[in-house]
Image: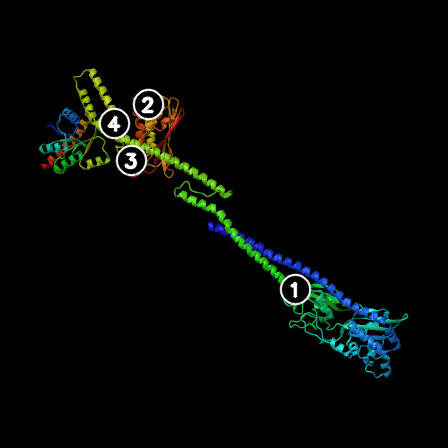
């Protein structure tokens, strides 16, 4: 019982802590992860803004550089002079200063009159006025005449008359015209990408560039257009700047956390996202879903996304070219792994806390169980002590809870047990005293009786022999009669003494107790009637036949009823009844009870203890020997029974004879 | 009818005298013995119709005496000597022992002359009828 209480408590504690722990592991890590993810998404959104600013500022710087160059007096003079060499120098230094991959000057009719050649920059020969090639007709640059249309900057400036800067798509033919090397750089083989949209071509040949075109005005007329730009294909410039400035080149497990990519349509043309083998993932493509959303609908996308080979928290936005077309995508993303690991760490911490909680629960459970069961154990030990007979066991320090109630109840039970024990001991002491007293008196009586018997025989014999004589006068006869009567009384006393001393023999026979009581009542009926005392008998039901000495038992009953009659005045009542009952002290034995209740004088409390003593009587001299009740007591005792008396002075007395159902063999 | 002979055994002279008085008043011849030994000696010499005896006597008690009597005069060989035992306060054990030794009748002390006479008469009447039966058998 003890151990199960303990384990129940521990299991309950464990269950609660486990439940709370698991719930907190789940909710905690989930909530935390979500909020971290949310934070990461916000951050990546801001990072995308920063990346866009870097992108735009690069465009702006090219635009500014071209504008400044277009204002240059020397350039204008050279232009008006048609000085190709001078213009070529200007272009080269402009390209060098602003990091331009291509630059050129177009005439007002749209023909390119000068551009950076395919030869290493700086050679003046590379730059030839367009007029020259046109006049020569056979120039290797003739092909570029048709390319003018394909230059979006020139087209834009000439059509609108305003400077322009921004993103443009450049066809392969334009790139070839500008610089064959440029075309080669722009050429990107497409790599198979699992989630991308299908595409037939095996490579991307067009290029994406940022750049600007500015009109060179003479008066209000646009005399020429200066253009220039930077090819984005395979460029590391912008994406690495984003990585280094926005993400501050933060690394996680040896990899850059932040990545940036520029897409041409759906193809990565500039990126620092790496393929599993560590190369820049140029030529891989965007997943169809993101492509549709960003390119197709022009939406901004912020979510976790699978990029090349890892999950990233990403942000995409479309790149709009100078004509307002969506031509590409700007992307930034951070490795999700960091956050996943963070979640794992959090979970681990929560699980650790849960485990600690469970350990604490086990500890607390056993501690509490110990505290709860300690007083219970003390009580169990105490009750074992009680069952062994120790009525003052230690029950441990008092508790202030339900156990305390149990303890106080237990203590009450103990005190009533002690009281009962004391009472029983007192009763048996009284009984023992009574028996000892009777035994002593019995021995004395037996001795006296024997000594008296012989002389008494003589007295009786000679008195009666004298009475038989005819020659005595009446007076002598009367005197002799008195002697005879007195001697008879002595004989009766001695007989009583002998009865009392238990030397007489029981002659047991099966007896109907009700019949016995009824006959005893009948014998007294007349006397009661004469005295005016009501005498009733109420037989009990179901009394078994009991083996006992009929005549002795009857004399006991008669003795008690006669005593009651003596104590009851006219108008009173005596009720005799029999019952199947229990004895007060021998609760384990069923027995037969015979009660005699009267409404007589009662017995004074000081006399209650003496009424069974031999020779104790309250009757006047000559009316009682004082042996009746003590003899009765002896007879009932020899039958294994008891006589009890309850009495109230002035109200009456009740004598109760109790006999066990079965007589013991040796009685 | 010839005079019946009764042997009275008791250590108390008063009792002996009382018994003799009553028995002789009844017409029997009473012989008194004050001890078991004396009673046995008397029994060796004379024939008695009845023995009235006490139990509690010094030296040898009534049970011893009864045993000796039955030893010398077995119940089946000789017309039984009826024995009337005078008791004071016999215990069940004493009564049992006496019955085993052939005591047939008891009288409690103190007794009146009438009680003793009646008891003696009863025993003598019974032995008389036994005697008659046996004598007729002999013939």
Cα distance in 3D space between marks 3 and 2: 34 Å
Q: Identify residue for label 1.
A: A336
Name the spot of residue A346 as percent of width and height, x first.
61, 59
Residue A40, picture quadrant: bottom right
- The mark that comes first in sequence, 2 or 1, is 1
Distance, label 2 to label 4, CA atoms, is 19 Å
Dot 2: few (<14), some (14–19), or many (≥20) neighbours within 10 Å?
few
- What is the number of the mark on residue A144? none
Q: Chain of mark 2?
A: A
Task: Tell if the residue under mark 3 belongs to the same chain as the one under mark 2.
Answer: yes
Task: Between residue A428 and residue A588, name the one nearer to us.
Answer: A428
The residue that mark 3 highlights is A509
- The answer to whether residue A488 shows anywhere in this view is yes
How far across and how far down the image is residue B6, in percent? 13, 29
Disc nearer the start of the sequence (4/3): 4
* Rendered image quadrant of residue A473: top left
Camera-side residue of A49 and A150: A49
* Residue ID for mark 2: A619
Q: Are marks 2 and 1 on the same chain?
A: yes
Left or right: A148 in relation to B40: right
> Can the viewer see residue A581?
no
Q: 10 Å neighbourhood of mark 3: few (<14), some, or many (≥20)? A: few
N-terminal label among 3 and 2 = 3
Q: Earlier in the sequence, mark 1 or mark 4?
A: 1
User: Is circle 3 on the same chain as circle 1?
Assistant: yes
């Amino acid at each position: 019982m003890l151990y199960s209480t303990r384990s129940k408590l521990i299991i309950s504690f464990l269950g609660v802590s486990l439940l709370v722990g698991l719930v907190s592991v789940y909710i905690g890590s989930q909530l935390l992860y979500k909020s971290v993810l949310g934070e990461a998404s916000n951050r990546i959104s801001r990072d995308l803004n920063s990346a866009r600013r870097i992108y735009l500022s690069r465009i702006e710087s090219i635009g500014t550089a071209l504008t400044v160059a277009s204002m240059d007096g020397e350039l204008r003079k050279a232009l008006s002079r048609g000085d190709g060499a001078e213009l070529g120098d200007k272009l080269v230094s402009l390209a060098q200063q602003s990091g331009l991959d291509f630059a050129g000057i177009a005439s007002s009719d749209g023909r390119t009159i000068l551009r950076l050649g395919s030869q290493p920059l700086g050679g003046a020969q590379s730059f030839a006025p367009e007029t020259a090639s046109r006049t020569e007709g056979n120039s290797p640059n003739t092909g570029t005449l048709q390319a003018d249309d394909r230059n979006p900057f020139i087209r834009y400036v000439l059509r609108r008359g305003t400077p322009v800067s921004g993103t443009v798509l450049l066809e392969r033919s334009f790139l070839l015209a500008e610089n064959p090397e440029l075309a080669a750089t722009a050429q990107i083989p497409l790599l198979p990408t699992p989630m991308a949209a299908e595409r037939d071509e095996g490579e991307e040949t067009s290029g994406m560039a940022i750049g600007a075109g500015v009109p060179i005005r003479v008066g209000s007329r646009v005399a020429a257009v200066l253009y220039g730009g930077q090819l984005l294909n395979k460029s590391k410039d912008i994406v690495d700047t984003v990585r280094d400035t926005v993400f501050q080149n933060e690394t996680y497990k040896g990899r850059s956390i932040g990545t940036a990519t520029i897409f041409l349509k759906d193809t990565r043309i500039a990126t620092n996202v790496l393929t599993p083998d560590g190369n820049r993932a140029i030529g891989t493509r965007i997943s169809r879903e993101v492509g549709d959303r960003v390119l197709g609908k022009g939406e901004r996308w912020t979510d976790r996304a699978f990029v090349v080979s890892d999950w990233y928290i990403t942000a995409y936005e479309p790149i709009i070219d100078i004509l307002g077309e969506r031509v590409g995508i700007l992307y930034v993303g951070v490795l999700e792994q960091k956050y996943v690991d963070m979640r794992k760490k959090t979970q681990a911490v929560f699980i650790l806390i849960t485990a600690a909680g469970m350990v604490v629960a086990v500890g607390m459970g056993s501690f509490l169980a110990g505290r709860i069961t300690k007083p219970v154990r003390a009580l169990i030990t105490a009750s074992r002590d009680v069952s062994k007979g120790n009525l003052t066991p230690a029950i441990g320090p008092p508790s202030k809870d339900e156990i305390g109630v149990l303890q106080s109840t237990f203590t009450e039970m103990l005190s009533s047990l002690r009281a009962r024990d004391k009472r029983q001991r007192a009763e048996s002491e009284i009984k023992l005293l009574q028996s000892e007293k009777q035994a002593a008196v019995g021995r004395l009586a037996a001795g006296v009786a024997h000594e008296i018997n012989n002389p008494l025989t003589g007295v009786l014999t000679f008195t009666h022999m004298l009475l038989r004589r005819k020659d005595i006068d009446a007076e002598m006869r009367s005197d002799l009669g008195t002697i005879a009567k007195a001697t008879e009384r002595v004989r009766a006393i001695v007989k009583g003494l002998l009865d009392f001393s238990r030397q007489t023999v029981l002659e047991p026979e099966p007896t109907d107790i009700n019949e016995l009581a009824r006959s005893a009542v009948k014998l007294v009926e007349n006397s009661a009637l004469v005295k005016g005392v009501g005498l009733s008998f109420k037989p009990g039901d179901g009394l078994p036949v009991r083996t006992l000495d009929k005549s002795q038992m009857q004399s006991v009953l008669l003795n008690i009823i006669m005593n009651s009659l003596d104590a009851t005045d006219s108008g009173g009542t005596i009720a005799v009844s029999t019952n199947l009952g229990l004895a007060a002290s021998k609760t384990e034995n069923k027995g037969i009870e015979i009660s005699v209740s009267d409404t007589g004088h009662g017995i004074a409390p000081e006399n209650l203890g003496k009424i069974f003593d031999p020779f104790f009587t309250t009757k006047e001299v000559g009316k009682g020997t004082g042996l009746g009740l003590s003899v009765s007591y002896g007879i009932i005792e020899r039958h294994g029974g008891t006589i009890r008396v309850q009495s109230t002075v002035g109200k009456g007395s009740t004598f109760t004879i109790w006999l066990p159902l079965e007589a013991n063999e040796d009685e | 009818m010839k005079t019946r002979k009764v042997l009275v055994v008791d250590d108390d002279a008063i009792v002996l005298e009382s018994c003799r008085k009553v028995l002789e008043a009844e017409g029997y011849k009473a012989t008194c013995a004050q001890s078991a030994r004396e009673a046995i000696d008397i029994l060796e010499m004379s024939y008695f119709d009845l023995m009235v005896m006490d139990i509690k006597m010094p030296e040898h008690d009534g049970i011893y005496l009864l045993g000796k009597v039955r030893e010398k005069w077995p119940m089946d060989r000789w017309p039984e000597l009826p024995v009337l035992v005078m008791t004071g306060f016999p215990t069940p054990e004493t009564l049992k022992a006496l019955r085993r030794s052939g005591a047939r009748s008891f009288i409690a002390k103190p007794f009146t002359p009438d009680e003793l006479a009646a008891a003696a008469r009863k025993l003598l009447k019974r032995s008389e009828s036994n005697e008659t039966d046996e004598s007729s058998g002999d013939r």
